[in-house]
Amino acid sequence: MAGGAQDNDEEITGINVTPLVDVVLVLLIIFMVTANFIVRDSMEVDLPRAANGGESVQGLVNVVLDKQGKLFFDGAEVSEDELRRKVAEALAKDKETRAFISADQSLPYARVIWLLDLVKGQGVAKFALNIDKDVAPAAAPAAP
């Protein structure tokens, strides 16, 4: 039989996909396990722009909570009621007023959230957070 198929050639009747299925299952397990480690929690905050960046920030108030628990509004020490009143006054002047909130890192988390609630309760919708060690207001006198 010239030019024809030889009798000793075997026909391929199927493809063994078992190794392929094994590899896919292993990869699926790896992706499912590592997906739990990729989750990122984020919080959207509106950060103020630099004054020399082309757009100046108007209606910005600076609220500081130091490690002794004292409140400062734009560098001056205030009580809780005074802070509420001053934030409300700033909002009356400009409805787009933003708050820049700073707190010492040694403070309990609940105390910082309390400050956020206090500021947001007065109507400030946009704020930026600055949690820093040894936060001291600019106009406050240094401790002896």
Image: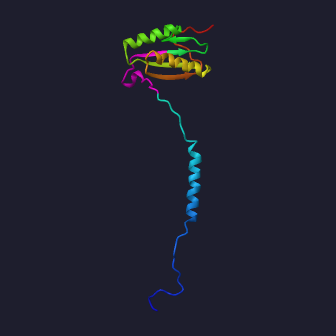
Residue 46 lies within the magenta run: yes
Where residue 92 sits: x, y (%)?
38, 12
Where residue 86 sits: x, y (%)?
45, 9
Q: Is the magenta stretch mostly helix, strand or loop?
A: loop
Question: Looking at the picture, does residue 47 appear above or below residue 20?
Answer: above
Q: Which residue lies furthest to the bottom in this view?
A: 1
Residue at figure coordinates x 54%, y 9% from the top left: 140
The answer to whether residue 38 is left or right of residue 85 is right
Question: Which of the 4 image quadrants contains residue 142?
Answer: top right
Residue 58 lies within the magenta run: yes
Residue at figure coordinates x 59%, y 55% from the top left: 26
The answer to whether residue 44 is left or right of residue 68 is left
Where residue 129 sits: x, y (%)?
50, 23
Q: Give the tally of numbered discs.
A: 0
Where residue 64 sits: x, y (%)?
53, 15
Question: Looking at the picture, does residue 38 appear above or below residue 55?
Answer: below
**Quadrant position of the C terminus in the picture:** top right
For the magenta stretch, what is the residue range? Answer: 45-62
Residue at figure coordinates x 57%, y 11% from the top left: 70
Q: Give 53 or 60, whichever is nearer the viewer.
A: 60
Q: Give 15 or 144, whichever is nearer the viewer.
A: 15
Figure coloring: rainbow
